[in-house]
Amino acid sequence: MPPFTLANQTSTMLYSRTLEDSKFDYFKSFLSYVVLGDLSYEKLVRPIIKDAHDLSTGEKNFYSINRNTFPVIVYLVEQDKSFFEKINPDNLTQSNYQHILKLVSHQREIAPSHFA
Amino acid sequence: MTKRLLELHLVQAEKALDRSSDNNYSDRSKQGYHEKLNDLHEKIRSAFDELNETPKEKEVFELKRDTDFIFKSLEFLDSSTLNLIPFEIVECLKHALFDWVQPANYIIVTSLINDFRSFSYDPTIAFDEQLFQSLQHKYHVEFTKRLIQINFPRSLSRDYLACVVLYHELGHFVDLKNFITSALTENFYSWINLNPSFQKHVLPYFPFLNLKMIASPDARVKQITQFHFGEYFCDLFASQYVGNSLNSYLYFLTQGSGITSSTHPSTTNRVEIVNDFLSDRQNILLDFIKEGVFQITQNPLKIRYEPIKSKDFFNLLPIEIQNVPQLHGLFPFGWELWSGDRMAFEKSLNTQSPIPSEQLYTILNNLIEKTIGNFIVTQQWQQTIIPSSVAH
């Protein structure tokens, strides 16, 4: 339908953040706390990493991974599928967390959002 | 300097909360949400007071982001214009929305916009689950409800014909919540490569694709595919509730465009897939979409409206609606009456000359509104009566 769009973005704003950006920001933020040693944030990142593991091994698919964190999970697997295949999601190490933080700290490819 | 800027942001939020403190909400859940915002502001203020003179960038960013949430929530709450909202339309949309999300978790607020094209939903904060997790983790403030804002063009807020567009927009909302078309797109290329015999049936719906792109789609191609899946899905979603009435409107708005753009499929293709859905005709792409939607939501795409047979409108009487599918059926019915033969109305008005279009427009909208209003009252009455009769 031509002009009817979701109002979560506008081109006339000083800056704009999409829902997807927000999901990445929070994940990155939670993960950086874990890397800094605040393990209380582990429970907020583990389910995402577990889904990335399950998606990479085929235990889950694009239809069954968690919907709230879908873009983050898909992005992680796209970035380093073999890493997520190999990790043990029930026993994640600091080095695992550091590697994942590095993956989400890259500039993501910029493309127009579906809901812009 | 940064700390001072953050302080400014916090004071602005405090003032905004003060200004909204007299908001008169129609229900307790909005009041409860508002009170949570006050708690949150207090907690953010305490965290601010604990910062040293040169806080880390991350600390400032997080407190700013948390304060932004207060502003955004107030923006939604303040615009919930109780006396102006077309609550009859909202009621119908609520029924459709609650087929797809848990009603207890959401508060719907509405806003009238000075733009005749502004039919939309704003789920900006409703679907940001990590935001709510973060607020709970850091400040122990739990928001059990999520705000969804429905925007209406002020000039069309009581137009029961044009509002079928909102059912299409609701599709975008459901899509965004579940990442439906993102998942369909991710699956699409492996599916089509595994089933080359499907290509000749499916590719006409994506005329920008060639065999090379299918074998190895780049990010841009995937994105256009996702845009197109989005529109196909939302058309199908809407047609569950309003039949093909959206097709007619779409043809008018796009001048029946056969042109495919980077964001939208051609109207011809969109209408075709909806017609196949409504007629239960075999269509491989349609089956692919239906299967994906079901796997993701555990909810099937299916016809969810009941055609209206009543002749009451011709006697200028509201219809007695028996159930929710009939309630949605009012919209295609309205379109049928607007587009069809007007003789019956002319007869009931006892006029020899053709009924003036503005009169028909007013009559139709009034009758639909009254019909929905009666249904709402009856339902509320039944909900009041049934619990007490159960008690006896």
Image: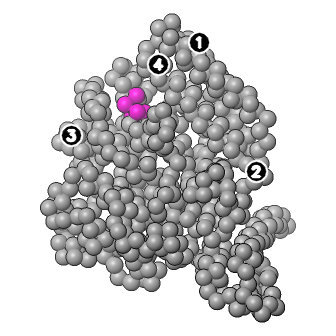
* Residue visible at 38% across and 62% down in the picture: B264
Tell me the number on the disc at residue B59: 4
Q: Are marks 4 and 1 on the same chain?
A: yes
Give the magenta range: A25-29
Report if the CB atoms under discs 4 and 1 are less than 8 Å apart: no
Q: Are marks 1 and 3 on the same chain?
A: no
User: Could you tell me the amino acid type at mark 1?
Assistant: Asp
Question: Which residue occupies the foreground of this view, B256 or B311?
Answer: B256
Residue linked to disc 2: B82
Question: Which residue occupies the foreground of this view, B49 or B228?
Answer: B228
Residue linked to disc 1: B49
Callout 4: chain: B
Q: Are marks 2 and 1 on the same chain?
A: yes
Tell me the number on the disc at residue A80: 3
Identify the secondary structure beneath mark 4. Answer: helix
* Residue visible at 51% across and 57% down in the picture: A4
Q: Are marks 2 and 3 on the same chain?
A: no
Residue B198, image quadrant: bottom left
Callout 1: chain: B
Identify the secondary structure beneath mark 2. Answer: loop
User: Could you tell me the amino acid type at mark 3?
Assistant: Asp
- Seen in the picture, residue B147 relative to B102 is either above or below; the reply is above
Q: Are marks 4 and 3 on the same chain?
A: no
Question: Which residue occupies the foreground of this view, B43 or B6?
Answer: B6
